């Protein structure tokens, strides 16, 4: 990029350049880092390379006397590098001398780029001084141009200064675990927008913690005993762009950062045709990215011996590097201390960057052993839009839509011209004849249920049963529709219909086994009143029609019965409360009279509200009058029928109170003792029953 082009470029646009673009297309950025990397070098992850302090008095690159160097590096103009924290710093418990940050913005040549915790970065290895790097340039240029009339020959390094700088740096690769700044007593609070120049004293206090990746040459130089996968086996499976994630992490200065790269995490595939296709697919999707399929653990076992353990990656399959950073899922480290993170408008603007990738559209030659190789034909990827997030075309049987069969109207016949079917004639039989028919059918079906050892459900709730059906002979298992249908089909001939019911009584019953009821109850507890889902859970045991019938024939009446019992229990508690108030009033009657005489002019308000019904003290309430009448009736009945018959009726009342018997059953017991010899007592007993249960 020439200086004229730089002037035309706006100072800040919505679409900023990422650190990757800086490494690939901005050679002045690479030069700036190569010029300054000795001021802050990255610590070595193991004993693979010695740590050099660097020469503080080394000659500056711009003062190189070589004319060829000046020609080759004339475009490598030094630029100012600025660092800026994104968001406010926060301290951790127990550590007061550090402020931790989530993101760091690097501004090189007027182009901002953001690096955040969890990103993979390139770190300066400090293997070459600037002089050595630029002294290497004339040799490369001479070999590239050649001696034959300036004809350019194929060279893996290339003639562009940025590629020369990149290949010469040979950076380390690591994953950012933390950003922090060492603070002094005067500077206890972090500033979220302080721009700190690279030459400032504060650069030494701005640091980061990096977990290192191992390259192929690092594995080859390791000394120790390999456990599990051998050295030869792992080296034979690694390519120049394969990495291994280690457990070692070091702290380095911010100035050691060269830029961001992309590392694809994937599981190692066995050698097969599918594995080759998968590797090819990954290479196409993540061109220029590194691939990490293994983890490595180096442990010191004493006597300068190391135990090296290599194990395959078992996490999620390859991350899609083509997805923009704004659409990627945040790593686990990004969720830590997220409450303390605050982004300003400038930082938010700078995050709107191009898709992150180490080398966009980059593919290194197979014979190239330099894993830091950058192809000359680098180009910017277009912005990721809706529909191009995966950048893959879904082709195959798995991605086809399911098309149902065409339904034609050949077998359809209209039913508009069909006359309705008659299913019942209400005026053929009288009410008494139909009741006697139902009684006979009830006896036949109940006898069949007893012989088959089938539990008979309690008869229909009396407030829901039809008036013309005798409640003593109807059960919920009876299919009254089928019974009425057989009577209609036999032209209302009662004897013939009864004979048909005797021949096949099971046809006129709704029979549910205990297993079927358990299946229904399980579905009812899970889906409540969604009958469609309950019938699906029944399987082939019962169809949807039978489930609907059971729901409204058995379940709903039972729930209503429980509701009635609950209301009855509430009424019983109210009466018990009334009795308790009456007893307390009776016991405290003497003391209250004494207190009223001693208190002077005190309002004498009667507390016997249960007796008076809220009226005057001389009035008698309705409940109290019924109670008194019931006591008088029981005393008169005992004197009239004798003690033995009286005890029989008392047992009936106790059964009704404990809900063992129903009201009709209790009345039937009273009628067996009183109706023939003492009809006046039976009439008085009916007065205490609800009207619908009285004898009409």
Image (cartoon, rainbow, N blue to C red):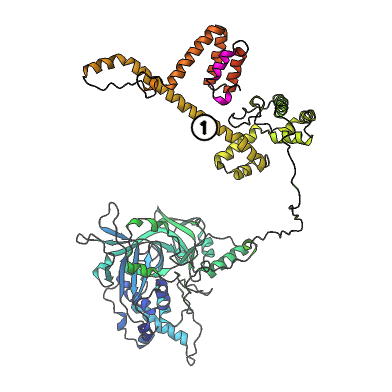
Closer to us: 513 or 307? 513
Q: Quadrant of the C terminus?
A: top right
Task: Please tell me whether mark 1 sits on a helix, a strand or a loop.
Answer: helix
Q: Residue at x 52, y 75 (%)?
A: 365
Total labels: the figure holds 1
Image position, residue 80 (x, y; %)? 30, 76
Residue 395 appears in view = yes
Q: Residue furthest left?
A: 186
Residue 681 is one of the magenta-drawn residues? yes
Taking 411 as reference, is 675 left or right?
left
Q: Quadrant of the N terminus?
A: bottom left
Taking 245 as reference, is 480 left or right?
right
Image position, residue 412 (x, y; %)? 75, 55
Image position, residue 104 (x, y; %)? 34, 66
Q: Residue furthest bottom?
A: 149
In this view, 273 is above or below 583? below
Residue wearing tag 1: 563
Residue range highlighted in magenta: 679-694
């Amino acid at each position: 990029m020439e200086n004229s082009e730089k002037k035309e470029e706006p100072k800040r646009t919505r679409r900023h350049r990422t650190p990757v673009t800086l490494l690939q297309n901005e050679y002045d950025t690479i030069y700036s880092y190569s010029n300054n990397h000795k001021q802050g070098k990255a610590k070595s992850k193991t004993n693979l390379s010695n740590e050099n302090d660097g020469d503080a008095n080394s000659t500056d690159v711009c003062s190189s006397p070589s004319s060829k160097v000046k020609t080759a590096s004339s475009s490598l103009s030094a630029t100012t590098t600025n660092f800026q924290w994104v968001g406010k710093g926060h301290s951790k418990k127990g550590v007061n001398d550090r402020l931790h940050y989530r993101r760091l913005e690097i501004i090189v040549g007027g182009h901002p780029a953001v690096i955040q915790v969890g990103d993979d970065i390139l770190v300066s290895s400090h293997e070459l001084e600037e002089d050595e790097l630029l002294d290497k340039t004339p040799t490369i240029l001479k070999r590239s141009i050649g001696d034959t009339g300036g004809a350019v020959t194929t060279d893996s390094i290339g003639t562009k200064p940025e590629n020369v700088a990149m290949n010469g740096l040979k950076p380390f690769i690591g994953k950012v675990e933390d950003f922090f700044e060492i603070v002094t007593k005067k500077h206890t609070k972090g500033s979220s927008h302080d721009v700190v120049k690279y030459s400032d004293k504060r650069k030494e206090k701005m640091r980061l913690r990096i977990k290192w990746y191992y390259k192929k040459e690092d594995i080859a130089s390791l000394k120790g005993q390999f456990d599990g996968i051998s050295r030869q086996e792992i080296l034979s499976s690694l390519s120049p762009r394969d990495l291994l994630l280690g457990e070692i992490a070091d702290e380095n200065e911010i100035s050691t950062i060269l830029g961001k790269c992309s590392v694809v995490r994937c599981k190692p595939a066995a050698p097969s045709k599918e594995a080759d296709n998968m590797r090819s697919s990954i290479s196409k999707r993540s061109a220029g990215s590194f691939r990490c399929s293994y983890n490595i653990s180096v442990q010191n076992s004493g006597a300068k011996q190391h135990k090296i353990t290599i194990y395959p990656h078992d996490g999620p399959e390859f991350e899609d590097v083509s997805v923009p950073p704004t659409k990627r899922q945040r790593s686990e480290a990004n969720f830590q201390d997220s409450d303390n993170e605050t982004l300003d408008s400038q930082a938010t603007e700078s995050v709107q960057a191009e898709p992150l990738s180490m080398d966009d559209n980059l593919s290194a030659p197979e014979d190239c052993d330099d894993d830091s190789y950058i192809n000359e034909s680098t180009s910017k990827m277009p912005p990721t839009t809706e529909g191009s997030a995966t950048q893959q075309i879904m082709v195959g049987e798995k991605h086809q839509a399911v098309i149902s069969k065409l339904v034609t109207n050949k077998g359809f016949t209209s039913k508009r011209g069909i006359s309705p079917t008659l299913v019942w004639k209400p005026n053929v039989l009288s009410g008494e004849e139909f009741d006697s028919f139902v009684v006979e059918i009830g006896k036949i079906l109940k006898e069949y249920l007893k012989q088959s050892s089938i539990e008979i459900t309690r008869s229909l709730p009396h407030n829901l049963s039809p008036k013309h059906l005798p409640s003593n002979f109807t059960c919920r298992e009876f299919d009254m529709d089928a019974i009425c249908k057989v009577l209609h089909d036999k032209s209302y001939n009662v004897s013939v219909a009864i004979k048909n019911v005797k021949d096949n009584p099971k046809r006129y019953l709704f029979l549910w086994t205990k297993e079927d009821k358990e299946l229904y109850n399980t579905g009812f507890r899970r889906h409540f009143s969604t009958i469609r889902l309950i019938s699906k859970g029944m399987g082939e045991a019962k169809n949807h029609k039978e489930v609907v019938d059971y729901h409204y024939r058995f379940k709903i009446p039972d729930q209503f019965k429980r509701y009635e019992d609950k209301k009855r229990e509430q009424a019983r508690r109210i009466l018990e409360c009334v009795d308790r108030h009456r007893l307390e009033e009776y016991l405290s009657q003497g003391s209250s009279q004494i207190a009223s005489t001693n208190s002077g002019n005190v309002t004498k308000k009667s507390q016997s509200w249960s007796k008076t019904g809220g009226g005057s003290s001389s009035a008698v309430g309705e409940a109290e009058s019924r109670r008194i009448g019931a006591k008088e009736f029981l005393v008169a009945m005992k004197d009239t029928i004798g003690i033995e018959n009286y005890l029989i009726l008392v047992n009936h009342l106790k059964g009704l109170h404990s809900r063992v018997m129903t009201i009709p059953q209790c009345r039937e017991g009273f009628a067996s003792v009183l109706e023939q010899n003492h009809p006046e007592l039976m009439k008085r007993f009916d007065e205490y029953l609800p009207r619908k249960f009285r004898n009409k």
